[in-house]
Image: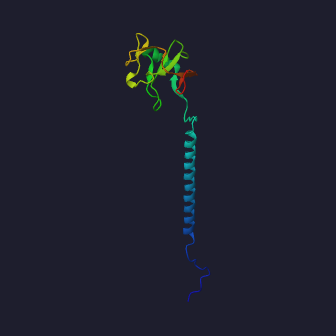
Amino acid sequence: MPPPDPKPKPSGPTGPPVQKRRASARVFVTFGIAILAGVLLLVFIVHTASKPGTKVNLGSNLYQVGPTKTFADTIAKDGPVLNQALTKGGPDIYIQHIGNDPDIGWRVFEAQVQGSGRQCTLQWQAPAQQFLDPCTKKTYPADGTGLKGYTTVVSGGRLAIDLRSSP
């Protein structure tokens, strides 16, 4: 007969399998708490942003156009630059430069009369130095007077446009 074992063998679920189950449970609980926190944060942001008078700014207010000298030279040679919808659902705009100094004389305005569709995008008439509305045949001066305009910012020889403001 063999001698009795000094260490009795444990009976039931003990040892490494229990530790693995406990670690898995901790990971599951931690993951669940993180998901719950994310959902609560999202609900808070949506609730706060949907209150009347709340402004939500997820990016810069300024559209960076580029070097003033480059754009002034391009416009002098080819006419105003048409940018179609720089932001989703945003307006089509013309970037115009008036004068010889690349740091002043910038005008940015909508490429259609308010309420008109893209089929009525203004057309640059180089010989007359004016814009023509193809739908109404009305003309607008080179500086965009009579059209909705936007504020321009020149800093360090670079042009930017504030698409959320009027001049």
Residue 61 against residue 154 in the figure, above or below = below
Q: Position of residue 18 (x, y in %)?
A: 56, 68
Residue 71 against residue 7 in the figure, above or below = above
Q: Position of residue 114 (x, y in %)?
A: 45, 23
Q: Quadrant of the C terminus?
A: top right
Camera-side residue of 145 and 106: 145
Camera-side residue of 115 and 97: 115
Q: Residue at x 52, y 17 (%)?
A: 106
Q: Quadrant of the N terminus?
A: bottom right
Looking at this view, name the residue that lies furthest to the top: 128
Residue 58 against residue 18 in the figure, above or below = above
Instruction: State the image quarter where residue 112 is shown.
Output: top left
Number of numbered labels in the structure image:
0
Q: Position of residue 158 (x, y in %)?
A: 55, 22
- Colour convention: rainbow
Q: Position of residue 64 (x, y in %)?
A: 52, 27
Residue 90 against residue 97 in the figure, above or below = below
Q: Residue at x 56, y 39 (%)?
A: 49
Decide if residue 32 is on the left or right side of residue 110: right
Camera-side residue of 8 and 48: 48
Q: Residue at x 54, y 59 (%)?
A: 28
Instruction: State the image quarter where residue 80 is shown.
Output: top left
